[in-house]
Image (cartoon, rainbow, N blue to C red):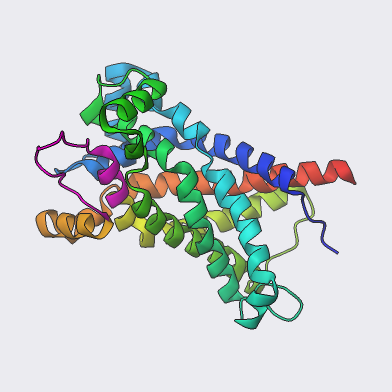
Amino acid sequence: MEEKPSPSQEVLAGLFSGVCDAVATHPLDQVKTQFQINNGENGAVLDSLRRQAADGGVLRLYRGLLAACLRPQSLCMYTGNEWSKRICQGSSGQQVGLANGQGALTITGGFVAGGLTGYFESACVTPFELVKVRMQSFDHVGRFHSTFHCAVETARNEGAHVLYNGFWASCWRNCVFNGTFFGLLHWWKLTLPLPKPTTTLEATGQDISLGMGASFLATIVKMPFDVAKNRLQNQLTPPPGGEPPRYAHTLQCCATVWREEGGAALFKGFSPTVMRIVLGMSVGYAAFEFALDKMLSRQR
C-alpha cells in the first residue's frame, strides 16, 4: 500500500516548494508583470532584464521577492490539491464519477480536484500578490521602499480591503490553471507508458518533464485572467469623488483590454510567463515531491 504523507509533512513540503519557486523565477515573474500591465508595446524579455539590472543592479530584479516567498502559493496549491483529491475520492465523489469504487481518482476527478484548489489558494495569496505586483510595477517605482512599506501604505491610504483587490480574477486564473495542470498530470500518469523511476534523480527528472508540459498548456488557458488580475491589482483606488477606476472586475477588464488593445493584448507577457511558469512549476513540483520523499524515507 502506498505510504501517505501526514498533513504537517505536506505543509512543510509546500513551504519549501514555494521558496524554491520564488527564488528561481522572480526576475522572469517581474518582467511578466510589467509586460502585462503595460498598455503599449513590449520589448524582448532579455533586454528588459538587462536594462533593469543596469539601472538598479541585480537586486532591482528581485523587488517584491519577500512577498513572493511569504505568499503560501505553492503550499496552498500542492497541499490543497492533496486535500481536494481526498474530497473527490470520498463517497460523494464516487457517486458523481470523480473516483472509482476503490476510491482512485478518475481522469475527470483529477481535473476537478485541481480546479478546486484555486479558491483556497486565491484566498491565501491575494494580498501577497497585490503587494508583489505593485513592487514590480514601473508605475510605483519610488513610491514604496519595501514589501512591508507597500502593504502598510496601501492599507493606510486605500483601506485594508484593497489588499484583496483582484481576488475573483485570482480565482479565475488559479482554478483554470490548477485544474488544467493537475488534471493533465493525473491523466498522463494514468495513461502514458512511463517507466518506473528507480532513483530519486530519475523521479525528479520525470516530475520536471511532466511539470513542464502540463504547465505550458495550463499557461495558455489562464493568460487572459492573469492579465486581468495584474491590471486590477496594479491600479490605485481613486479618492472619493474621483474618476472611477479603469478596471472594475475580471470580465470587464478582459473586455476593455480586448476592445482598446485587441485580443492579442490578453496574452501580453506570454513569453516571460511561459518561461516563468515552466521553470517555476517544474522546480516547485519537483521540490514538493522531493521534500515529501525525503520526509517519508526518514520514517521507514
Instruction: Count numbered badges in the picture.
Output: 0
Q: Is 146 positioned to the left or the right of 198 in the image?
A: left
Query: Quadrant location of the N terminus?
Result: bottom right
Of residue 118 and residue 241, the one placed in the foreground of this image is 241
Closer-to-camera residue (196/81):
81
Residue 232 lies in magenta, yes or no?
A: yes
User: Where does the image place residue 85, in percent across and percent down from the top left?
Assistant: 64, 64
Q: Which residue is drawn at 46% across and 34% down?
A: 68
Q: Specify the quadrant of the image occupied by residue 297.
A: top right
Res 49 seen here: no
Magenta region, residue range: 228-249
Looking at the image, can residue 150 be seen? yes
Q: Where is residue 255 in the image (x, y as percent from the top left)?
A: 18, 60
What's the magenta bit mostly, secondary-structure-wise? loop
Is 250 covered by the magenta stretch? Answer: no
Q: In this view, does 88 lie to the left or right of 161?
A: right
Q: Residue at x 23, y 29 (%)?
A: 138
Q: What residue is at 13 percent from the left and 54 percent from the top?
A: 261
Q: Which residue is drawn at 29% across and 57% down?
A: 224
